[in-house]
Amino acid sequence: MKIKWLGHSAFLLEGSKRILIDPFITDNPIANVSEEDTKNIDYIALTHDHGDHMGDTEKIAKETGAKVITIYEISLDLQANGVDSLGMNIGGTAKLEGASFSMSPAMHSSGKGNPTGFIIEMDGEKVYHTGDTGLFATMSLIGEMYSPDVMLLPIDGLFNMDVRLAAKAVELVKPKIAIPMHYNTWEPIKADPNEFKKLAERYAEIRILNPGDSTEI
């Protein structure tokens, strides 16, 4: 599987399917997105409905026919706007063609429904995108029950975990690889990913990406 960071919390997963997560692109000042990144999308995983996560979800879904997987209440709104959307809830798993989406809790806020994360499995690999979240002790159960290969987690320290708390989250989940996100988009959420790496590299391989960079797992 190839994982591309588009900036902020937006990622493109490429394997047998093409999956976008939280595609905040148009108004994202650090986005580094090619025209091809938003074409031929099969699924969009949306963690919650804040603007810096919902972003271009509806536009891309309508242009590509991608199915949006999100919490039930947000799904109803998307369906009312003509978007193909699957509503689900925390603890559930949607087994779709070529990929599965397990919805996890997140400690945050949301306009509708609850904030969430996803454990996405494709081609035998599992990626845990935490969504926006603070640290919570039962992250250890996510690690135990799903054994994610990769963890994508925020380090900004204003709306989410700071680097110290994010390092603890990596310790709890025990992924093979951790990739920081949701930082340096704007001045109030500036954070040093190298500081996160120093604190967390004893627990997992830390890969720091620049917007537009890809990594293979």
Image: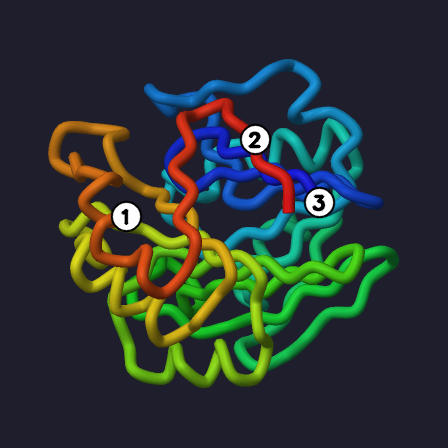
Does residue 157 sit above or below 89 in this rendering?
above
Q: Amino acid at mark 1?
A: Lys
Q: Amino acid at mark 3?
A: Met
Residue 30, percent from left and from top: 35, 21
- Toward which corner of the image does residue 139 lie, by quadrant? bottom left
Report the Cα–Cα distance between label 3 and label 1. Answer: 23 Å
Q: Amino acid at mark 2?
A: Ser
Residue 161, percent from left and from top: 22, 58
- In this view of the protein, which residue sits in the foreground, 113 or 203? 203
Compare marks 3 and 1 and give the one earlier in the sequence. 3
Seen in the image, is 43 located left or right of residue 188? Answer: right
Does residue 211 sit above or below 21 in this rendering?
above
Q: Secondary structure at mark 3?
A: loop
- Toward which corner of the image does residue 72 lie, by quadrant? bottom right
Residue 184, percent from left and from top: 24, 31
The residue where tag 1 is placed is: 197
- Of labels 2 and 1, the one closer to you: 1
Quadrant containing the N terminus is top right
The residue where tag 2 is placed is: 214
Question: Outermost residue, right direction?
Answer: 97
Does residue 151 sit above or below 30 in this rendering?
below
**Residue found at x 43% / y 53%:** 205
- Of labels 3 and 1, the one closer to you: 1
- In this view of the protein, which residue sits in the foreground, 134 or 23? 134
- In this view of the protein, which residue sits in the foreground, 17 or 59? 17
Residue 203, percent from left and from top: 36, 65
Q: Secondary structure at mark 1?
A: helix
Compare marks 2 and 1 and give the one earlier in the sequence. 1
- Which mark is on residue 1? 3
